[in-house]
Amino acid sequence: MKPLYFTIIFYCIFINTANAQLDKGFWLTGGDASFTTNAPIPNTSTSQINSTTEIAPIIGYFFFDKFSAGLQTDITIFHQKKGSGLSGTDDVPNSYLYSFGPYIRYYLLNKEKMVNFFVEGDYAYEVGVFKGLNVPTNTTKNQKFNFIAGPEFFFTQSVGLEFTLGYYYENLIGSKSGDKGFQMGIGFMIHLERDD
């Protein structure tokens, strides 16, 4: 409960001084990063330990009030390690997934709101380089469409924290195979004024 109280107090301190910077001519930068790891449950047939590191920066420009467009990228590193007791090398070579593409974002409420809701659509071109033990490297090329929405909480004149919920569709280029699903996210955004 303490983090919730801290967030409420922090929000109340800045409620009279913050102002959403959604005007034409401002820059939008930010993104998110994540790290996940998993290990097998004892007495299961697998003993492989997996970890994933992801960095997803974004940069955009407000071409109109409340409307920004720009580029985003995503770098994901997959690492696998065998558990103890298995023969052979312990580490599997890292695999990578790179993606980049355009996005558009529109804020729905008045610019002066401390909490503003946005909708966003983006397209990403993905290249995956997957490596394994004693198997050739496999390279894939995908395209991904994301549609997300959520609130952005402005703590200061230039810093916001956003929570997103969305839908994605991804398919292998040149093939009808792919996947779709729902996604959730959290990230920081920094709104910077252009120097004239």
Image (spheres, grey):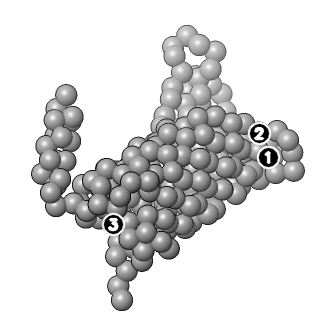
Q: Quadrant of the N terminus?
A: top left
Are the residues tagged 1 and 2 within 8 Å (C-beta)?
yes
Q: Which structural element holds mark 1?
A: strand
Tag shown at residue 106: none
Work out how far the residue at label 3 is from the one at label 2, CA to CA, in angstroms: 38 Å
Amino acid type, mark 1: Leu
Rate crowding at label 2 as few (under 14), some (14 to 19) or many (20 or more) other CA atoms within 10 Å. few
Point 49% across, 66% down: residue: 68
Amino acid type, mark 2: Gly
Q: How many marks?
A: 3
Point 29% across, 65% down: residue: 158
Which is nearer the N-term, disc 1 or disc 3? 3
Which is nearer the N-term, disc 1 or disc 2? 1
Q: Nearer the viewer, residue 170 or 112?
A: 112
Point 25% across, 62% down: residue: 19
Q: Nearer the viewer, residue 153 or 112?
A: 112
Outermost residue toward the bottom?
196
Give the x, y percent position of residue 171.
Answer: 76, 44
Q: Nearer the viewer, mark 3 or mark 2?
A: 3
Rate crowding at label 3 as few (under 14), some (14 to 19) or many (20 or more) other CA atoms within 10 Å. many
Q: Which residue is mark 3?
A: 21
Work out how far the residue at label 1 is from the one at label 3, CA to CA, in angstroms: 38 Å
Work out how far the residue at label 1 is from the one at label 2, CA to CA, in angstroms: 6 Å
Left or right relative to 4: residue 139: right
Give the x, y percent position of residue 89.
Answer: 64, 37
Amino acid type, mark 3: Gln
Q: Which structural element holds mark 2?
A: strand
Q: Which residue is mark 1?
A: 172
Tag shown at residue 178: 2
Q: Is residue 96 visible?
A: no
Against 97, is 37 above or below?
A: above
Left or right relative to 134: residue 147: left
